Amino acid sequence: MRQCGRLFGALGLCSRGGRACVLACAAIACSQAVTGAPPEIPEFALENPAPGVYVHFGQQAEMTRANFGDVANLGFVVGARCVAVIDTGGTFAVGRALRLAIRHVATVPVCYVINTHVHPDHVFGNAAFADDHPEFIGHARLADALRSRGPNYLNALRRDLGDAAEWSAIVMPTRSVANTEVIDLGGRVLSLHAWPTAHTDSDLTVFDQASKTMWLGDLVFVGHVPVLDGNLRGFLAALNVLRTVHADLAIPGHGRALAWPEAMAPEQRYLNGLLEDVRAAIKAKRTLTETLATVGDARGDWLLFDQFHRRNVTAAYAELEWDD
Amino acid sequence: MLNSSGTTERFAPTLISFAAFRGGGQCPSGGRAGTERQGVYYRQLPPNEPWSEQSPAVRTEVKLNFRFFCLMVALAFAAAGTARAQDANPEDSVVWKKVHASVFGNAPLEAADTVVRLDTPKRAEDAAIVPLAIRAQFPQTRERYIEKIWLIIDNNPSPIAAVFQFTPESGRADIETRIRIEEYTHVRAIALTNDGKLYMAANYVKASGGCSAPAGKDAVAAKASLGKMRLRVNDAVESGRPAVVQLMISHPNASGLAMDQVTRTYATPHFVRRVEVRYGGKLIMSADVDFSISENPNFRFYFVPEGEGELDAKVVDNQDLEFTAHVKLDSARLGLASTPR
């Protein structure tokens, strides 16, 4: 790169270290270099809010080439015997960065990879853990959900992320949770709970008893507008149960956690508003298209509102129109 | 450094070299990545310290490196290619050329402006439920009416999503439904009028973002309520005037295209293949459809009630299960009794 900079600097094309110059150098030096080795993400931050609990907060964004699909919160819990990973990110590259981070802070192997649900930003890093031969754990319906959605997700990932999606793959669960189960990491127990259809039909939460940390998956969104891809009333019902959980730390699927259960309040308001608005539209005999045109003074401070709100209205309408 | 026992002492910051954090691999020809040492900063907080955006406890940072630029350049080129593909002319679609030849014998198609209008969103927000409307631009009369409308979604696994049939008794050859969109695609409505002419309206629909799939929301629930139906006539109905009908069918409408990764076999397809709606025995709308129609198929269309009668909907799926629903329209409902004008 230094040579490159000197060359272009000498030619008067750009100042040394300038962005355009670096790009030009990269284009020349690496025009054939992106195949073969897995892509690497440029930055991966890890936080350690409680002993043995590590979290990577993904960006509040849609999955793009630039962010490598690093948009969901991920992390892991370290026990005396082994490590349990909770969600793996939107690409192999993110999963790989998470795996390298684990090696830095833990000497014990990864024995469990838990997916909180089927969405691509949470599962496509799984393949990076294949060499650890962990148990891949998911909701009892995760396998079916991955079967019917996985190929679409993978196509879309390749379409939207190009080379950044390389090496990403669908990894099926090897162990499923139908209700509640516990796994032991060696002196540290995690309880896993499978939910009826809510955000999706494969939502699983993880509770670390030692630190009282609740990994919520996408049952809770903070900042990022909630996304409905399951059942609206199921979603609200799940929140009603979750709010009774005593947790010192709550890790949502997207955004920063605040105090629990206060962290869920904005989402609960949003989903209740969605329920009321769409119900009113159906009662007024508005069609789905008419409803999409009229519903929504719900924007508030939500991030990614334009990307997901209309989708939520669509899903809510299709569910609620069967009610009366 | 590892501490899983729940102690509360504060740890001294720990520095870890960045090079070890990365995998192997470097750009060829001199651009050695990651040679500058980047710091990784660790700080462990006691578990009860407030945890918020303002107090990130431990942060590990890896700065942009050379390899990343390589990737970004490659991606920029790839993105440009995709953008060009999206602007494709509807006539250039390979699938369309095949369908045009096989279904329409390459017959000429006129622009549909004065015959039908096709309403779709520009982007499929939820890939599984994309609202779509085809609206006739003139009423159905014995002299001039739309006989058939083909709904074609070029880049779906089965491009011919529906073939709707209408009669003069339909009143209006309008249809509203919801479709699945797999990919960036042209969506077409091709209308055949009773004089044998064909007209095409086409829209380009962008696929949804990567976290939406055309699969249903809850396959188990859909199966549990299989065959439940709603058939509704708009409240404001008057003899001799077109009235809106809504038909809702609880059905997974599943493609069976999902492969079981373990057994390498495909799921059983289970979808509605035919819908017929009659009033007083006369056909007002029929549809030959498949799994491009969303889970819980939903249709809105018109009919003209000429006097008292019964509206009958019959639905048959690909496993030959048959479902029916009926609505009676008596003179009171039709305003035929002594309602003052």
Image (cartoon, coloured by chain):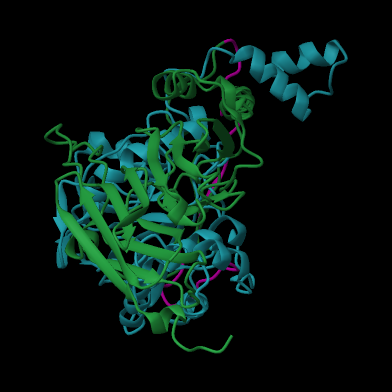
Q: Give left or right: position of B325 versus B1.
A: left
- Magenta stretch holds residue B198: no
Magenta stretch, main secondary structure class: loop
| Quarter containing the N terminus of chain B | bottom left
Residue lying furthest right: A12
Question: Which chain corresponds to the colour green?
Answer: B
Question: Which chain corresponds to the colour cyan?
Answer: A
Give the percent coordinates (x, y) of residue A230: 35, 62
Magenta residues (range) = B29-55
Tell me which corner region of the image, top left, top right, bottom left or bottom right, holds residue A99.
Answer: top left
Q: Give left or right: position of A297 versus A237.
A: right
Residue B1 seen in render: no
Q: Give left or right: position of B7 versus B141.
A: left
In this picture, is B285 found above or below B311? above
Give the percent coordinates (x, y) of residue B56: 54, 63
In this picture, is B83 found above or below A124? above
| Along the viewing direction, whichever of B167 and A245 lies nearer the viewer | B167
| Quarter containing the C terminus of chain B | bottom right
Q: Residue at x 35, y 67 (%)?
A: A231
